Image (spheres, rainbow, N blue to C red):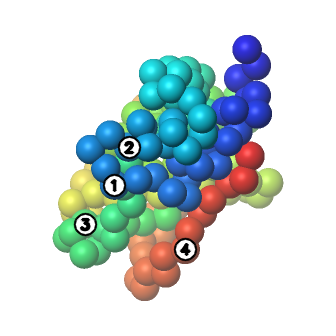
Amino acid sequence: MPLLDETNKKILNNIQLDFPIDPRPFKKIAEKLNLSEDELIQRIATMKDEMLIRRIGGNFSPDRLGYHSTLCAAMVEEDKIDLFTQTVNTYSGVTHNYRRDHNFNIWFTFIAPSVEIIKKSLEEISIKTGVKTILNLPATRVFKISANFKV
């Protein structure tokens, strides 16, 4: 089965916008998509294994929970991009990262209980990857927008 068949596209589009608050959310989604709960869970597990889905979880406002958030931009040499992004993704406070066509070519967001943890983590990432230039651009005012990607 192709990884992005029509059923998986429907699953991805659905779970981004309308994830039910329910004791059995996957059952609710499966019913809506005319699938069995087991098939839905298996398809999601496969997409997670293939890194089409990195995480399924709630979105919370970091500042309301006493956390700090920052946007980071890094200058990563082409031959270090895989190592850098894999290293960044090991940190639980990283919500997502993406590549841009710019000198600062890898961007990611980082959320942590303190600015000290963010600073220490960025230093660790630099040491582990050899990437020296990582900008730490902390949020001074938060605007929450919905980022949904139609598949």
Which callout, 4 or 1, points to the residue nearer the camera? 1
- Residue that carries the numbered disc 4 in the rendered image: 145
Which callout, 2 or 4, points to the residue nearer the camera? 2
Left or right: 94 with respect to 17? left
The residue closer to the viewer here, 6 or 112, is 6
At mark 3, the secondary structure is: loop
At mark 4, the secondary structure is: loop
Q: Amino acid at mark 2?
A: Pro
- Residue that carries the numbered disc 1 in the rendered image: 21
- Residue that carries the numbered disc 2 in the rendered image: 25
- Residue positioned 45% across, 21% down in the render: 38
Q: Mark 1 near mark 2, Cβ–Cβ under 8 Å?
A: yes
Question: Can you give x and y, in whole percent of width and height, for residue 132 in the image?
Answer: 52, 47
Which callout, 2 or 3, points to the residue nearer the camera? 2
Question: Can you give x and y, in whole percent of width and height, for residue 53 in the image?
Answer: 55, 36
Question: Can you give x and y, in whole percent of width and height, for residue 24 in the image?
Answer: 32, 40
Decide: few, some or many residues near mark 4? Use Cα within 10 Å; few <14, some 14-19, many ≥20: few
Q: Amino acid at mark 1?
A: Ile
Q: Amino acid at mark 3?
A: Tyr
Q: Quarter of the image holding residue 103?
A: bottom right
At mark 1, the secondary structure is: loop
Which callout, 1 or 3, points to the residue nearer the camera? 1
Decide: few, some or many residues near mark 1? Use Cα within 10 Å; few <14, some 14-19, many ≥20: few
Q: Amino acid at mark 4?
A: Ile
Q: Earlier in the sequence, mark 2 or mark 4?
A: 2
Q: What is the distance, in whole Å, between disc 2 and disc 3 at their CAs?
A: 27 Å
- Residue positioned 41% across, 36% down in the render: 27
Q: Earlier in the sequence, mark 1 or mark 3?
A: 1
**Which numbered tag is attached to residue 67?**
3
Q: Residue at the far right: name it.
A: 101
